[in-house]
Image (tube, rainbow, N blue to C red):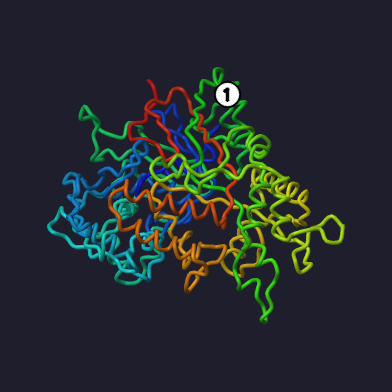
């Protein structure tokens, strides 16, 4: 699947190197050409790329396996990878991919159409849990996959499906190695983290050489890799990579500052010092762009939580009232968040899709400016008043405006943001009980028992807007303000459902844009999510690195990276 900055550099919160030798440490740089040392925050859960759902597993296997296509992070277009080209017919339902003929698996066996068919057979097998099946189904149906010949594969879709090209680039796996496990029902146990590295068979630029749990993963160049540079020379240039497993961000920052590591993805509070010391450290500190994701406030609109034994909790009325939500939106001090939470490295967020997504971001939305007086006026007009003079507002039935606010504990930026929210909302006469929760508890509340009122949370962003369909669609299980609706609860949610269908059918990107712009308008008007801020993303790396071209969407042509001699 397409390589991203997170995947290639290894959930790159950190980058670290070894300071001493041991029998369980990677080879020293004196004994070999220089490897690029990066790090991941935890051990991988699996080496099976089909089963992988966590960043650490993706980082461990991202350079071992490849897809038919990959994303060019500079253009955001799909480009050929294991498929050298493709065609789509006039109906938009028949896609034909022509495979490269010079690709071999690590064990020397040729890569053919049979491997493509086998991979998609695994993905659509309901016995195999994976995250790819959902984005490849069209109206609940899988595409028909057939081999025209040994090096040509044809996909036939039930209807035109615009996201198909970005979705089809899943990591491909070898039929001759894994088909017996699929047949005997043990595929889900294959390529666990105790698998000997030489048993992991891919086509990618690197092979796994060693894995020592809680310490490191060492990758070495695949000397039989099919890709060549513009002069016909072999790729990748780097002889290998080391991913250290270091769960503490403070420690990895100190290692980078000490010159032991090559790349670092800094937190906001680290940027100033890195810039100040860039000459002495011989590093470049590069701003790569705004967060491609979103961080927002949401209120629970789920009747399952607020209607019990025929009685409706008044909070459900507040959280679905646009007057209440507009007042809340005008009481979010985004500039204070940027200064105090992001050290000045951020911008107000308005639309759900990041400005970094040049095609699908709607630039025409007007922000809800921070104005507590206006927020008070809107609340008054909506019937939310301090009726007894105790400083707290009540609704028309005399219920005090009071609710809980949460975010994931340990995320210092979000915890600071919640403190700002509570302070301003308290000034409006609203009682806010703030309590951060550990991430697992938070996930349970959002997805299982729905026991929450307000939350500050973030979602990652992708280039393909349909990847958010499970979040935006009323029936989606990630539509967390009111998930799994049998029928849309509101007219505006029904309109979003329709727009998602239309957007997935339209193959012309310029025409598709109108549907996703309208979705952003609806979200901005109805406020099921209330946008906050986006941080500016930076990466720091050694000046000795050449061809290192980071973007918010990933590294451009990572196979070209090397160290100056």
Question: Who is closer to the viewer here, 490 or 91?
Answer: 490
- Name, please, the residue furthest toward the bottom: 309
Q: Which residue is mark 1?
A: 275
Residue drawn at x 68%, y 47% is 331
Q: Is residue 407 left or right of residue 155?
A: right
Residue 413 image point, x, y percent: 64, 43
x, y (%) of residue 206?
Answer: 34, 42
Residue 115 shown left or right of residue 447 in the figure:
left
Q: Is residue 552 above or below residue 422?
A: above
Q: How many numbered callouts?
A: 1
Residue 423's place in the image compared with 320, above or below, is: above
- For the view shown, which residue lies furthest in the top direction? 279
Residue 49 visible somewhere in the drawing: yes
Residue at 41% x, 65% y: name it.
Answer: 129
Give me the residue at 61% from left, 26% from top: 272
Q: Nearer the viewer, residue 145 or 323?
A: 323
Q: Residue at x 33, y 67 (%)?
A: 139
Q: Residue 249 at x, y = what percent?
A: 60, 40
From the viewer's perspective, tell me whether residue 154 is left or right of residue 70: left
Q: Quadrant of residue 132?
A: bottom left
């Amino acid at each position: 699947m397409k390589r991203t900055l997170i995947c290639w550099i290894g959930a790159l919160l950190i980058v670290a190197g070894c300071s001493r030798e041991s029998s369980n440490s990677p080879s020293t740089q004196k004994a070999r050409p220089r490897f690029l040392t990066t790090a991941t925050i935890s051990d991988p859960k699996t080496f099976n790329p089909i089963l992988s759902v966590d960043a650490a597993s993706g980082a461990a296997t991202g350079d071992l396996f490849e897809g038919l296509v990959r994303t060019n992070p500079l253009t955001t277009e799909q480009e050929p990878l294991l498929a050298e080209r493709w065609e789509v017919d006039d109906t938009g339902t028949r896609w034909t991919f022509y495979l490269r003929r010079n690709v071999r698996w690590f064990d020397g066996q040729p890569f053919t159409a049979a491997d493509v068919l086998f991979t998609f057979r695994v993905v659509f097998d309901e016995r195999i849990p994976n995250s790819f099946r959902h984005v490849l189904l069209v109206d609940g149906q899988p595409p028909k996959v057939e081999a025209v010949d040994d090096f040509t594969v044809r996909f036939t879709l039930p209807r035109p499906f615009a996201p198909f090209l970005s979705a089809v680039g899943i990591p491909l796996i070898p039929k001759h190695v894994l088909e017996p496990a699929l047949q005997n029902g043990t595929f889900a146990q294959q390529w666990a983290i105790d698998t000997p590295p030489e048993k992991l068979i891919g086509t990618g630029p690197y092979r796994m050489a060693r894995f020592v749990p809680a310490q490191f993963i060492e990758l070495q160049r695949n000397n039989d890799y099919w890709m060549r540079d513009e002069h016909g020379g072999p790729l990748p240039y780097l002889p290998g990579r080391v991913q250290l497993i270091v769960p503490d961000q403070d420690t990895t920052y100190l290692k980078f500052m000490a010159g032991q590591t090559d790349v670092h993805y800094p937190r906001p509070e680290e940027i100033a010092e890195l810039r100040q010391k860039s000459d002495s450290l011989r590093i470049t500190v590069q701003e790569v762009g705004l967060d491609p994701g979103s961080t927002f406030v949401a209120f629970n609109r789920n009747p399952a939580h607020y209607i019990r034994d025929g009685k409706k909790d008044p909070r459900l009325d507040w959280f679905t009232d646009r007057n209440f939500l507009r007042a809340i939106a005008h009481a979010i001090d985004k500039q204070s968040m940027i200064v105090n939470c992001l050290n000045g490295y951020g911008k107000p967020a308005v639309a759900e899709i990041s400005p970094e997504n040049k095609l699908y971001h709607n630039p025409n939305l007007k922000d809800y400016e921070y104005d507590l007086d206006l927020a008070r006026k809107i609340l008054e007009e909506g019937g939310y008043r301090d009726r007894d003079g105790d400083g707290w507002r009540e609704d028309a039935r005399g219920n005090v405006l009071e609710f809980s606010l949460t975010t994931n504990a340990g995320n210092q930026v979000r915890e600071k943001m919640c403190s700002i929210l509570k302070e301003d909302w308290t000034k409006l006469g609203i009682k806010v009980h703030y309590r951060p929760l550990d991430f697992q508890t938070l996930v349970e509340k959002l997805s299982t028992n729905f026991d929450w009122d307000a939350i500050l949370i973030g979602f990652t962003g992708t280039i393909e807007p349909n990847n958010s369909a499970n979040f935006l669609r009323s029936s989606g299980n990630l539509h967390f303000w009111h998930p799994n609706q049998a029928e849309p609860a509101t007219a505006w949610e029904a309109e979003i459902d329709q727009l998602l269908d239309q957007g997935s059918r339209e193959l012309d990107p310029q025409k598709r844009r109108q549907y996703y712009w309208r979705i952003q308008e609806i979200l901005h008007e109805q406020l099921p999510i209330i946008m906050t801020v986006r941080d500016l993303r930076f990466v720091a790396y050694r000046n000795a690195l050449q061809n290192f071209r980071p973007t918010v969407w990933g590294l451009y042509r990572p196979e070209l990276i090397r160290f100056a001699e």
